[in-house]
Image (tube, rainbow, N blue to C red):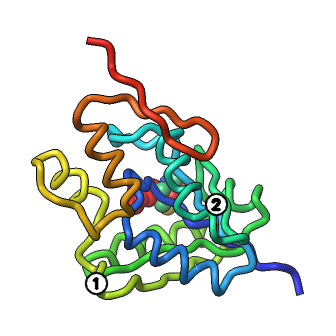
């Protein structure tokens, strides 16, 4: 049997404990799971691609079958290039379903060889999203327990005005010039 390679695409701005929960579940059922960060999102990101990549790499280093990559353009074309046969997406609540169904069916129309697999994160994370994490952090609220401690620390630094620099598997910081 050929190894089953799955893509877990997203913005991951930033990685939350809900994402990590899904990564752990996905790593158990797929032979290889590629966390793929979308490079050219229309959204104005909080963390740069190298910052997000470095944090995700550090937080998933314990999974030998998980790797981190970035992509641009159509997800299905990238998936085929990576020899993937599955796309992993998380569904937290019914409200996610309509958008996810539309995307999954469109991706299937574009590339029938790629199957979208939906998984549910632990119910503790059903209300959690990167957007809410960014908003809470910007407004000075606590994101403890919602994101890994490394992300929490980097959120604080980022919002204090430091520039985070990815160097190797770690994220280091440099003070923004005034
Ligand atoms: O974390 P997000 O923002 O919910 O992830 C959305 C993502 C990256 C999965 C989606 O925007 C995507 O696949 N973008 C790549 C461009 C593409 O293939 N668009 C057609 C989707 S049917």
Task: Give the tally of numbered discs.
Answer: 2
Between 140 and 87, the one nearer to me in the picture:
140
Q: Quadrant of residue 8?
A: bottom right
Question: Callout 2 environment at 10 Å: few (<14), some (14 to 19), or many (20+)?
Answer: many
Q: Quadrant of residue 34?
A: bottom right
Q: Viewer-nearest of labels 2 and 1?
A: 1
Whether the residue under disc 2 has CB within 8 Å of ligand 1: yes
Q: Which residue is mark 1?
A: 124
Quadrant of image for the C terminus: top left
Image point (32%, 29%), residue name: 162
In this rendering, position of residue 41 left or right of residue 157: right
Image point (22%, 61%), residue name: 143
Image point (53%, 52%), residue name: 37
- SS of the residue under disc 2: helix
Q: Quadrant of residue 66?
A: bottom right
From what the image shows, is residue 45 above or below residue 148? above
Upstream in sequence: badge 2 or badge 1: 2
Residue 113: x and y in percent read 72, 73
In this rendering, position of residue 7 left or right of residue 13: right
Residue 47: x and y in percent read 39, 41
Tell me the number on the disc at residue 72.
Answer: none
Q: Which residue is mark 2?
A: 76
């Amino acid at each position: 049997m050929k190894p089953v390679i799955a893509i877990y695409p997203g913005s991951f701005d930033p990685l939350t404990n809900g994402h990590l929960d899904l990564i752990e579940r996905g790593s158990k059922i797929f032979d290889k799971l590629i966390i793929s960060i979308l490079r050219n999102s229309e959204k104005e990101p909080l963390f740069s691609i190298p910052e997000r990549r470095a944090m995700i790499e550090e937080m998933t280093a314990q999974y030998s079958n998980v790797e981190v990559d970035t992509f641009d353009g159509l997800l299905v074309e990238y998936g085929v290039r990576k020899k993937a046969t599955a796309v992993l997406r998380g569904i937290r609540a019914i409200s996610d379903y309509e958008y996810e169904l539309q995307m999954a069916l469109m991706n299937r129309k574009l590339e029938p060889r790629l199957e979208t697999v939906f998984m549910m994160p632990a119910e503790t994370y059903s209300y959690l999203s990167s957007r809410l994490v960014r908003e809470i952090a910007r407004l000075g609220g606590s994101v403890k327990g919602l994101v890994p401690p490394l992300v929490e620390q980097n959120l604080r630094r980022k919002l204090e005005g430091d520039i985070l620099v990815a160097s190797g598997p770690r994220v280091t910081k440099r003070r923004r010039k005034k």
